[in-house]
Image (tube, rainbow, N blue to C red):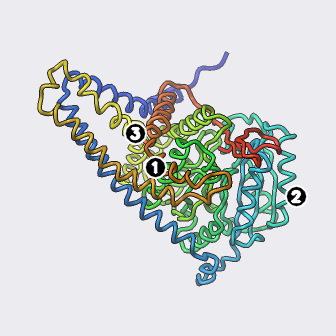
């Protein structure tokens, strides 16, 4: 029989459970109060909805400005020869800077990884300063990962200073199966090699990339430039703009909306540096990574978690530098539309599950007294508000905002002046919001990669028209997956890492799925 946990441990566990409940409780309480007061006090709710719609309209316009500014800056940055700019930096020898690039993979085929490596060897940064780590999973089966790794090393190993292949053991106690544990194992293994090579940690930039990440040719040079120009390079992470262009022409319209919407969000956040956090593929100092003990292996979403690890390690003196250079990944796509929708939903739910570390974050915000009080407050507020708005914003505007009209008759609301003006005000706000849709449709078209063969020029029309689906995408692939994630945490139904299956067209033009060399499946995180 197991011993009962100590009293102090029981208290801490109870406190943690309360904090796990909080995000979902706040969301469902909001929905419940709007519903109840739509019966009891519909005028108050209607007034709130009008103010809320106005707030979101102004917020949306503000975000559109940031989107345009960031897009223009990205277009300017990709035209610059960053390698030549490195030569102009005084008192810094950029030739001493090495890059470690980790590609965690599970059952991705050679074709998927070869696309990634084709992009990598086209980058302008000297290849003799690049160390590549193929980080495979033992649980994928030796016949799967070993064959793929051998083919990659044979074709591409000659281009780089070093290429290593690591195998993350299965079923390590305390780990969650996923990208984080694999990447951390790979980083620890490559550290042993770095020690043998005697390369100073402070002269290494490490990038943790998804296996389908195709780097822009200027990315590594730009990261190096910003690293050398930064006032505190070891207290900074470097975040590119993720776009999902690898297979966007083949994806269903609503998947394209979701993917492009994610890219837009990161463009917007990149121009609001104080809010920017690490996401998916990102870079940082290897010295810093070692000091914070690598990526956490017991969380589902390690990408933004690493920012908070560094934030607390440096007592709040840590930031994310936006790199206005795109890196291209896969749009969610499967063999059938239904499976594409299911996979997209599960991927978004996994992203929404970043609330998993809210208890750890909140407790550390209280304990870390060396961090200024205002910094702790504003950072906590941004985290909570971001997750709260994710679940409630679209739902209130789309559904709950109409509840006073639906349920208000119980108190005679339909006979009031407010009831007559309310629909016109809400519709007016939604009509004005179409301006934002127009801006998004234009920028999304400009973001598109070159049209591949097999697609008519007429598809550009559909690429613009597809934005009428944005409200649907916002609800079913935005708010609802996040509500699902928060509710699961609230109820103690803890999630595991979901490996998103994606597919591309083969040479015959068919959408195919699978893990062998004959197919083009990617199971990126």
On the image, the x and y values in percent for residue 92 come to 62, 80
| Number of disc labels | 3
Q: Which residue is mark 1?
A: 368
Dividing the picture into quadrants, the one containing residue 124 is bottom right
Residue at 34% x, 29% y: name it.
Answer: 31
Q: Is residue 163 left or right of residue 334?
A: right
The foreground one among 231 and 7 is 231
Q: Spatial distance from mark 1 to mark 3, Cα to Cα?
A: 24 Å
Q: Which mark is residue 5?
A: none
Tell me if I can see residue 20 in this picture. no
Residue 88's place in the image compared with 405, above or below, is: below
Q: Is residue 34 above or below residue 322?
A: above
Tell which circle, 1 or 3, labels the residue nearer the N-terminal end.
1
Cα separation between marks 2 and 3: 48 Å
Mark 1 or mark 2: whose residue is earlier in sequence: 2
Q: Nearer the viewer, mark 1 or mark 2?
A: 2
Q: Are marks 1 and 2 in contact (CB under 8 Å)?
A: no
Mark 2 lies on a secondary structure that is: helix
Residue 157 drawn at (x, y percent): 83, 61
Q: Nearer the viewer, residue 471 or 169?
A: 471
For label 2, the residue is: 154
Q: Disc 2 vs disc 3: Cβ atoms closer than 8 Å?
A: no
Q: Secondary structure at mark 1?
A: loop
Quadrant housing the C terminus: top right
10 Å crowding of disc 2: few (<14), some (14-19), many (20+): few
- Residue 436: x percent and y percent? 37, 52
The residue under label 3 is 388
């Amino acid at each position: 029989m197991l011993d009962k946990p100590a009293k102090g441990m029981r208290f801490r566990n109870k406190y943690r459970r309360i904090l796990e409940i909080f995000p979902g409780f706040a969301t469902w309480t909001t929905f419940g109060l709007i519903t109840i007061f739509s019966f009891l006090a519909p005028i108050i709710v209607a007034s709130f909805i009008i103010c809320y719609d106005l707030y979101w309209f102004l917020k949306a316009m503000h975000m559109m400005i940031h989107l345009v500014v960031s897009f223009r800056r990205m277009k300017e940055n990709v035209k610059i020869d960053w390698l030549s700019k490195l030569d102009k930096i005084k008192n810094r020898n950029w030739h001493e800077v090495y890059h470690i690039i980790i590609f965690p993979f599970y059952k991705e085929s050679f074709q998927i990884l070869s696309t990634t490596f084709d992009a990598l060897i086209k980058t302008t940064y000297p290849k003799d300063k690049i160390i590549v780590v193929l980080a495979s999973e033992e649980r994928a089966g030796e016949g799967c990962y070993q064959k793929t790794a051998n083919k990659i090393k044979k074709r591409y190993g000659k281009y780089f200073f070093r290429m290593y292949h690591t195998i993350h053991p299965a079923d390590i106690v305390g780990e969650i199966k996923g990208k984080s544990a694999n990447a951390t194992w790979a980083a620890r293994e490559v550290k042993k090699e770095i020690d043998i090579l005697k390369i100073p940690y402070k002269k290494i930039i490490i990038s943790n990339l998804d296996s389908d990440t195709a780097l822009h040719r200027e990315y590594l040079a730009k990261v190096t430039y910003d690293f050398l120009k930064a006032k505190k390079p070891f207290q900074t992470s470097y975040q590119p703009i993720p776009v999902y262009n690898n297979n966007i022409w083949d994806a269903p319209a609503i998947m394209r909306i979701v993917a492009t919407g994610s890219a837009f969000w990161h463009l917007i956040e990149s121009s609001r540096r104080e809010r920017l956090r690490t996401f998916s593929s990102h870079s940082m100092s290897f010295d810093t990574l070692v000091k914070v003990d690598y990526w956490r292996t017991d969380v589902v979403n390690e990408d933004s978690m690493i920012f908070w690890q560094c934030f607390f390690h440096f007592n709040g003196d840590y930031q994310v530098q936006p790199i206005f250079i795109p890196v291209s990944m896969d749009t969610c796509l499967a063999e059938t539309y239904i499976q594409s929708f299911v996979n997209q939903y599960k991927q978004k739910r996994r992203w929404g599950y970043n609330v998993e570390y809210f208890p750890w974050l909140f407790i550390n915000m209280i304990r870390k007294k060396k961090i200024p009080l205002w910094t702790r407050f504003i950072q906590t507020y941004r985290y909570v508000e971001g997750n709260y708005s994710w679940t409630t914003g679209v739902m209130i505007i789309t559904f709950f905002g109409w509840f006073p009209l639906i349920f208000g008759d119980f108190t005679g609301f339909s006979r009031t002046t407010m009831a007559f003006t309310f629909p016109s005000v809400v519709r007016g706000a939604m009509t004005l919001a179409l301006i934002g849709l127009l801006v998004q449709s234009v920028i999304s078209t400009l973001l598109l990669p070159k049209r591949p063969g097999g697609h008519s020029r007429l598809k550009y029309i559909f690429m613009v028209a597809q934005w009428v689906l944005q409200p649907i995408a916002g609800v079913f692939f935005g708010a609802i997956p996040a509500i699902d994630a928060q509710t699961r945490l609230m109820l103690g139904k803890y999630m595991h890492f979901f490996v998103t299956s994606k597919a591309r067209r083969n040479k015959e033009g068919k959408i195919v799925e699978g893990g062998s060399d004959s197919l083009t499946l990617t199971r990126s995180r």
